[in-house]
Amino acid sequence: MGRSLAALSALLGAILEGGCQPAAHPIGPPDTSAIGTYELAFCRRSCAFDDSASVRIRGILVLDSMKVAVPDSQAEYFAVANAGSWATDLMGHNPGAACFILHEPGRPTRNSHGLPVIRGVPAVALTNWRYDADSGLLLELYRSPDAAFRMEAHVSEGRLVGRTEQGGMRGEGDLGVRYVTGRRIGTPDPELCLAAAPGRWARDSLR
């Protein structure tokens, strides 16, 4: 069992390191840094940020250079809601320095054992991220030993455009969207994620 998990983890790592198609065509001169807070819109196919008829998921993404400082009262929640826990290939870049909030427009956020979820995955979570002006932005919105759902994007003049892709066990962690667009709205503000997460949560809730 241990060998099979290790092999699967290596396979997912290989996929994330370059086994997939490029995120998208460059949209302009790449920004030297992607650090900031972004508004995101996810669609099944290419769409505009304000295309309410096509947008299936909206969200906030915070990219920081420092690990998000999680208060003790939320430590257990973010230990579980952490897409970066299994993303060992990204730990050498900005581990735990990104967070996100996702929601479906017009629908209340669902809860599972006290965890806010969207299409079966945590709706508020931490993750790791990497940015290079040549290859763009890479981060994961979901990661387990069996599957991953990652986002790749180009960032130019504060505008973000890219794609998402699910890998590993079919369907696990798949949010059902393949295109992402967004815009930088300010400096990194991880407090937005902390405010959207449960103020206090314990692993006992999973029983």
Image (tube, grey):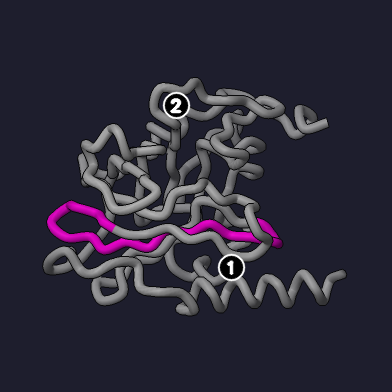
Figure quadrant of the N terminus = bottom right
Q: Measuring from the top left, give residue 63's x and y in whole percent.
A: 35, 51
What is the spatial separation of the Cα atoms under label 1 and label 2, in whole angstroms? Answer: 27 Å
Q: Closest to the observer: 151 or 73?
A: 151
Q: Judge whether 79 appears above or below 152 on screen.
A: above
Q: Measuring from the top left, give residue 184's x and y in whole percent.
A: 22, 46
Magenta highlight: main SS: strand
The quadrant in which residue 164 appears is bottom left
Is 107 situated left or right of 198 in this image?
left
Figure quadrant of the C terminus = top right
Give whichever of discs 1 and 2 has the lower sequence position.
1
Q: Which mark is residue 88?
A: 1
Seen at 12% across and 68% down, the residue is: 29
The residue identified by callout 2 is 195
The quadrant in which residue 151 appears is bottom left
Amino acid of disc 1: Thr
Q: Secondary structure at mark 1?
A: helix
Is 50 situated left or right of 45 in this image?
left
Q: Judge whether 92 appears above or below 141 on screen.
A: below
- Please indicate, yes or no, whether residue 35 appears anywhere in the rendered image: yes
Residue bounds of the magenta highlight: 144-161
Seen at 64% across and 44% down, the residue is: 79
Q: Secondary structure at mark 2?
A: helix
Is 195 situated left or right of 132 in this image?
right
Q: Measuring from the top left, give residue 142's x and y in whole percent.
A: 56, 52
Amino acid of disc 2: Ala
Seen at 30% across and 34% down, the residue is: 53
- Please indicate, yes or no, whether residue 129 appears anywhere in the rendered image: no
Question: How many circles with numbers are drawn on the protein?
Answer: 2
Seen at 40% across and 22% down, the residue is: 106
